[in-house]
Image (cartoon, helix red, strand yellow):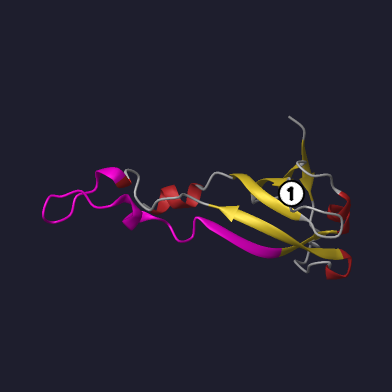
Amino acid sequence: MDVRSVHIGIRQNGDFAVAQAVPATVRLYDRLFTEPRPDAVRGEDGAYLPFTDFLNPESAREITAYVEAAANDLPAESRWQFERLGYFVTDRKDHAKGKPVFNKTVGLRDTWQAKAQ
């Protein structure tokens, strides 16, 4: 598997190098359900609740991000690591020259959530 890292132009003082950045569509995905076993949750009357009651409204989000201008020239279905965010792939159909589109494939491990519980 060929995965490359993307540096998005953040300077050491935290300022973003906007002059060289281009807008990109980034699709973020999370868990589909809010419960680990949505098919096994019972209501107060003992009957199973519909699994659709546990759909996560935040399971698919689309944001605009700013990335290096080189993203305009990337081929479709190329894999990239966004620093501190996870792994992304350029979209097969929607990614085009001048209109970069990235889909999240794997997020980085969230150790904060485990410590909070």
Q: Residue at x 15, y 50 (%)?
A: 47
Q: Position of residue 80 (x, y in %)?
A: 74, 44
27 lies left or right of 40: right
Which of these two is toward me, 17 or 61? Answer: 61
Which residues, given as a range, are shown in magenta? 39-64
Residue tagged by mark 1? 93
Asked if residue 93 lies in the magenta stretch, the reply is no
Asked if residue 53 lies in the magenta stretch, the reply is yes
Q: Position of residue 52 (x, y in %)?
A: 35, 54
The secondary element bearing badge 1 is classed as: loop
Q: Label 1 crowding class (10 Å Cα cut-off): few <14, some 14-19, many 20+?
A: few
Which of these two is toward me, 91 or 20? Answer: 91
User: Is 17 rendered above or below residue 86?
Assistant: below
Q: Position of residue 87 (x, y in %)?
A: 67, 44
User: Is 99 rendered above or below residue 39?
Assistant: below
Q: Position of residue 93 (x, y in %)?
A: 74, 49
Which of these two is toward me, 18 or 1? Answer: 1
70 lies left or right of 61: right
User: Is 40 rendered above or below residue 23?
Assistant: above
Single out the residue that lies furthest toward the front. 93
Q: Residue at x 60, y 55 (%)?
A: 28
Single out the residue that lies furthest toward the left. 45
6 lies left or right of 46: right
Q: Residue at x 64, y 51 (%)?
A: 85
49 lies left or right of 106: left
The amino acid type of the residue labelled 1 equals Lys
